[in-house]
Structure formats: C-alpha cells, structure tokens
Amino acid sequence: MQTAPKLQIETARVEDDRTGLSIETLKRAFLDNLFYIQGKFPRLATQHDYYMALAYTVRDRLLQRWISTAATYTEQSSRTVAYLSAEFLMGPQLGNNLINLGIYDRVQQAIEELGLNLDTLLDQEEEPGLGNGGLGRLAACYLDSMATLEIPSLGYGIRYEFGIFKQGLQNGWQVEFTDKWLRLGNPWEIPRPDWAVQVKLGGYTEAYLDANGHYRVRWIPRQVVKGVPYDTPILGYQINTCNTLRLWSAQAPESFDFEAFNSGDYLGAVQEKISSENLSKVLYPNDNVSQGKQLRLAQQIFFVSCSLQDMIRILLRQKLPLSEFSQKFTVQLNDTHPAIAVAELMRLLVDEHGIAWDQAWDITRNSFAYTNHTLMPEALERWPVEMFGQMLPRHLEIVYEINHHFLDEVRAKFPDDGDRIRRMSLIDESGERFVRMANLACVGSYAINGVAALHTELLQKDVLHDFYQLYPEKFNNKTNGVTPRRFMVLSNPRLTHLLNDTIGDSWVQHLDHLQKLETSVEDASFRQRWWEIKQANKHDLATYIQAHNGITVDPESLFDIQVKRIHEYKRQHLMVLHIITLYNRLKANPNLDITPRTFLFGGKAAPGYMMAKLIIKLITSVADVVNNDPAVGDRLKVVFLKNFNVKLAQHIYPAADLSEQVSMAGKEASGTGNMKFAMNGALTIGTLDGANIEIREEVGPENFFLFGLTAAEVKALKASSYNPWNYYQSNPELKEVIDRLKAGDFSGGNPDLFRPLIDSLLSWDNYLLFADYQSYIEAQEKVSQAYRDRDRWVRMSILNTARMGKFSSDRSIAEYAADIWQTPSVKIELTDNARLSR
Ligand code: H53
C-alpha cells in the first residue's frame, strides 16, 4: 500500500478557527468564512451569505470526525452496509448537524451576538429534495440511525441536479417548478473526482477465448458515461461516527469528447455530453408508481454500477480478495430501484474480474438484501425485454442465465408446476415480455423484508407468496422507524425542553425511555405545560398559514392534518367527504354546537397523475367555499399548504392535534408520517393499515381512533362485487355530500369539474371510500367529543408520545444490523494528524 507523505504542518493544539467551540472562536470563524469563502463582508452580505458562512463553520467542525471515521474504517476493514437507494430525502442539513454536534445553543448565542438570527439563517437552506416521499425520507432517517449506532455505512444514490419539483398553486390547481437546489451552491458536499468511474450503456456483446482458453464475454458499449462521486457527511448524534452519503453525478468522459473532436464532429461531442449529463439531471416525480421510462432504467444502472465499482475499489485498496466481497459489504436494496445490482455485480465479477460463474453467484447471493416497500401493483417495476436488452445487452444475457439456473431450482422443489414457473420466472412472458425486478431482487438476495408487520404478512401471503414458499428463511419483518433527532429535538424544541426537564435527555438515543413520562400523566401542572406547548406550536403554524395562505385560523381549534403524497389509495378525499358532511350539517342547522376544526392538507401529486391533481383542486375548492361562508364563521377552516417538504413538515408535526392515516387497509406498506405525528403528541385517526396497527398496539386502543374495514374485509368485499352505488343510496348524509359536489356547489356551479372523481367513486370506488365513510364519520364524532374534554385529550396526547419508543429508526436499524447485516458497531476515536500521516 502507498504510504501517505508525512504531514509537514503540525496542527496547533490551541483552539483554532476550524475546530474551536468557544463563542468567540465561533464568531471569528464565521466572519472568516464570510470573508474568505463567500468573499463578502457584512455590509454587502445577504442572509444567504451568512447561512453559507455558518454552514462552512459547522462543516469544519465535522471534518475531524468525518476523516477519523474514514481512517478507522480503512484500517479495520469493518463490515460495511452499502445502502443503495434511488432517493435520499435528506431535508436541510445545518440544523441537524448543530443538534448532532451538540452545539446548537452556543452557535445560536454566537449568531445572536453578531446581531443575526439563527432561525432566519436556518431558513435560508435549500433542502436537497432528492426523494419523493416515504421511501426517500426513510433512507435519510436510516443514515442518521446507522451513524448514531456506530454502524459503518455508505449511502449510495444519485446527485440529481433537480430534485422533486416545487409545487405552486394557480387557481387552486397544482403547478410545478423545477427545483434548482444547487443554484447557490451546496456547502455540505465534497466532490471526489479522483474516484470517478465509468458506466457502459447500449451496444452489443461478443464471445471470445481468453489467454487460458476460457470462454468469456465482452461488452462493446454504444456509450460510456462518467460517474463522479460527491460526498456528504452523515454525523451521528453526539458521537464521533460520521458516515458518508455518496451521490453520483453523470458526466461525459473526456476521452469520448476528444475522439469526436478529432473526427471533426464537434456538435456530436456536445450532444454526447448533454445526453450523458441527462442521467443525473432530474428525479422522476412518481411515488409508488413505475413509469417504465428508458431514462429511469439508465439512472438505475448508472448509480448501481458506480456504487458497486466503488465498493470493489475499496475492497481492493484494502488488499482483500473479491471472494471476500460479501464479508466486507452487505448491500441493502431500497426497493427494486437498485435491483439491477444483482446482474451488475455478476457482470463485474465474471466479465471484468474473471471469476467463475458459480463462485460469482455465491458472492452475489450472499451480498444483497432486499427491502420491499409496496403492495401497489402499479409500483412493481418491470422493464420491457426489448428496451432492457438495447440498453443493457450483457445484463439481459446474465438475467437469462440466472433465470435458467433459478427455474431449475424451482422445478426441483416443485415438479410439474408450470404455473408456478411462469409466475416466478424473472421474465414475464404472459404478453409483451418484461424483466421482473422484484423477482430478480428476491432470487439475488439472502434476506427479504417488508416494512411493517401487516405488510410483511401480506407479502408472504400474496405478492411474494411463491418466493416465500421457496425461501421461507429469507423473509423477515423490519417495521419502519423515524429519527427523533430531526422530528422531535430539531423540530419541536419546546417539547424537547419539557421532556428533558421531566425525564432527562436519554430518550434522544433511547426513545423507549419516553415511557418514564407515564407517571407525569397524573401531574396537572405537567399536563398544563403539555397543553401550552401544543398551543404555542399551533400558534407558530397559524402565523405561517396567515403569511403564506392569507387565511386566519384559530389556534384553539382542533388541528386536523393530513400531509403526504397525494394518492387515491391514501384517500385525502375521504377527509374532504367529512369536511363537506360537517359543512352540510352547519348549513342545515346554523346553531349546531360543533368542535371547531382547522383542516390542513399538504402533499405533492405526480405531475402526470390527473386524479391526484383533481383531488388538490377539490381541496382548494372546498376551502374557498367553507372559509368564506359567514354561516360557518370560524368553526371550520380548510387550508392546503403548498410545497410540502421536509422543512415544512418540521413545522407541521409539532402543531398537530389529529393525524389522519386513512389509507384503505392493505395498501399503505407502513407509513412514517403516522409515527412523526404521534411522537409529537398528535392522536391518530386511522385504519388498520401499515404501521398504524403497531402504533395502536403500542399506544393502546383507547388512545387511537380506529375506523374502517380490515385488510381481510377489504379483500372479501372486493371479491363479492362491491357496489358503491348502494352505499350512496342508503346513506343520506353521504348522498347529500355527493349530490352537492355533483351539483357544482364547490365548483362555481360547474357540474363537470369534479365529474371524473365523482364518477369513479360512484362506479368503482377502487379504494372503498363509500364503504368506510360511515365508520369514519363516527370515529370523527368521537374525536370531536374527546377534544372537548381537554384533560382527557392531553392525557391521551402524553400517552401517545410516551409510548412511541418502538418507532425510533434506531430500533429499526438495530434490528437490521442484528438480523440481516451482522454488522458490529465500530467505535471511532478522533485521530490526530500523526496517525493520519502514517
Ligand atoms: O415507502 C415508505 C412506506 C410507505 C410506502 C413508501 C414507498 C414510496 O414512498 C415509494 C415507493 C414505494 O414502493 C414505497 O408507500 O408506506 O412507509 C417507507 O417504507
């Protein structure tokens, strides 16, 4: 191994501007960064310049941990988790790093002494929105927990130039704007051009005999793209471990440009460059739907190949043989988006490194673990064989070969079962031929998990039933969790202070310690403080709503909130049916004594998903009518908060009284927003779906508002030819809601506007809104009653927080580490310069 040159400069042992933590040093370092990095001085500096200066000041204070962590992992060849995900919805970094470094308060003081305001600076950060929803945010929570639990890990993904679109509203309709998050620079990333790799696309393969007379295949690509890694530090909570998120950016390789220049084809070279860079241009804005686009497949192979090549580089640098790949790395596939990795690792091992097929297959099968995140049929990825073969000719051959061996294995275990072979084949041959990515992931992985107990059960029973029968030992459940650092400590400082005062601060790393709150439920002054904190948080959100929506909402009203991607299965429109029901009751009986409510919605619709966009228009249209009807007064308000993202989420969860988790049972794999709400003391109204079931088990059925059909009942009802029309005819309140919508009462008299939505409900109602309507309305009555009894409500709220220990992502990650990864934790000592130079 190459020995690093001895560092010439001895670092002073006195507090320096790059690491020092005293208020004075922080202030000096901040001004220094403003001057030398931003090239500004206070009179000219914008708030964003100040944010950048502060971000660099904080980054400097991470670096020793980051480098020490990398040095330790290099020396110890520790088993490492490679978390492969097409999405990492990180949210803003500055605040989280302040919390995890444990310097929030002193930085706040330093900033204030400089005459600035920390909240204003935090607000300047453009969040990296490199994800759509739950799946991407889960990946971000897991990185936080892996670092906090001292588990060596690398997150691998794509550095999209444009993340999830920014949502605007025009006349109540969603409009999309590109997310130029890198426009003003990203202080958190460090490019590593020296670790760039090349990825091949297109072309053809040919067979040849190598020097030893062995049959080999080489791939002559049509195009080669360069992947350049950009590293972001992932610091654990108040610990030395600082892991890495490595995101790949696509570039044209220089060599290709030069060839084209020499042949005089300047424009051709430019074209090649543009088409290469397109690979990491934009995140596909679909959540839980696969569009089957060629560029998306190119993105997948791009980041997967870059990441696997990077792992091989790391392995070889440590002088480990490739046969030890699976001892060094366990590669977690976050859904099927990176599942092509199974074929790509085989190609790298067999074609590029000359390993025999059987040995390569052993390595591969011991390296991957697959997390399935959905039961939605439209989300299961399948690539037309034709498209797949054109872009990845060698991978198609490898998939065929894997399939050949695999189907032999199936035949051996289940002889004469042609249907089973057809269902399990990696190639769907029922019509146009497709490569089935979930099947590839199942065959190529040593572990397969779902993300909540019900979800895993349904995978085993239904979607992956054949694979469960073949490989029962591979299946396991890992219920999702979320990080309490971001979603409690950072976003709810008031609650954090109260918790710390009451039970100490160990809950931040051991969320189950929140149990200690249970005794405080009997303490009236504690309950009073609890209530006041929620009120203060609601006040803050009301101020935000006033500023952004121009709507005055009453912080004393019940804040009833649904924030998540807009999707028919999540049933935002069920909440609208309830709003219109209450509205109708008030119109019929203006003096009705109802519990005042503020209904809040937030979430993006995929730009091509017309029904989801119509649901947004429905919400904003109902809001226009209800908010401006004097007969309603302040009793009901409806607000759609535009551009729901991590930053906004952090303002919303702490201010919620009621969390709406109303998906049709059997559709939401887990949900994670449900956990963020409950941790912050919101009560849940929900179906027995996803993790709701486990939340209810933990908090107790008496502290949860349950409604609706179970997954089994849904299945049975659907099998018995469900007819929504009957529910409409026999339920007068439901009928009135639908009739008013039909009549155009919420669309300026236009009966056509919501027709597609109403027709779909009346004719198919795929997600059984009508079947669950009555049960939902009754549960909402119970909510209203409970909220009127403040004492009772606060007790329930406290118990929700107190019993959320299970839903820390630390618990999930500890289970992944113990049951799937077998990754012991590694303590990081801060290395000094002498050690680094050895
Ligand atoms: O993943 C979350 C789950 C949630 C599920 C979501 C998800 C996506 O956001 C995108 C694709 C996909 O297959 C699944 O819908 O239920 O909580 C994290 O597991």
Image (spheres, rainbow, N blue to C red):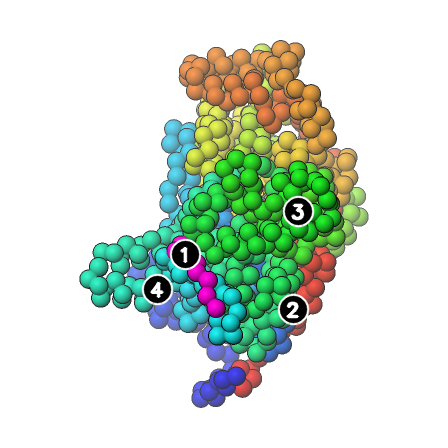
Q: Earlier in the sequence, mark 4 or mark 2?
A: 4
Task: Mark 2 and mark 1 in contact? Answer it, CB < 8 Å.
Answer: no
Residue type at mark 4: give it: Pro
Image position of 694 (left or right of 263): right
Is the CB of the residue bearing disc 4 within 8 angstroms of ligand 1? no
Residue 718 position (above or below residue 745)? below
The reply to whether the C-beta atoms of the residues labelled 4 and 1 are less than 8 Å apart is: no
Residue at left 62%, top 76%?
76
**Which structural element holds mark 4?**
loop
- Which residue is farthest front? 213
Tell me the residue that label 4 is attached to.
253
Quadrant of ligand 1: it is top right
Q: Is residue 656 visible?
A: yes
**Gap in angstroms between the C-alphas marked 4 and 2:** 32 Å
Q: Is mark 3 within 8 Å of ligand 1?
A: yes
| Residue on which the image places disc 1 | 204
Q: Residues within 10 Å of mark 4 (few under 14, many from 20)?
A: many
Point out the image quarter for the C terminus: bottom right
Determine whether, in the image, residue 796 is placed left or right of residue 120.
right
Residue bearing mark 2: 327
Residue in front for this viewpoint, 722 or 501? 722
The circle drawn on residue 451 is: 3
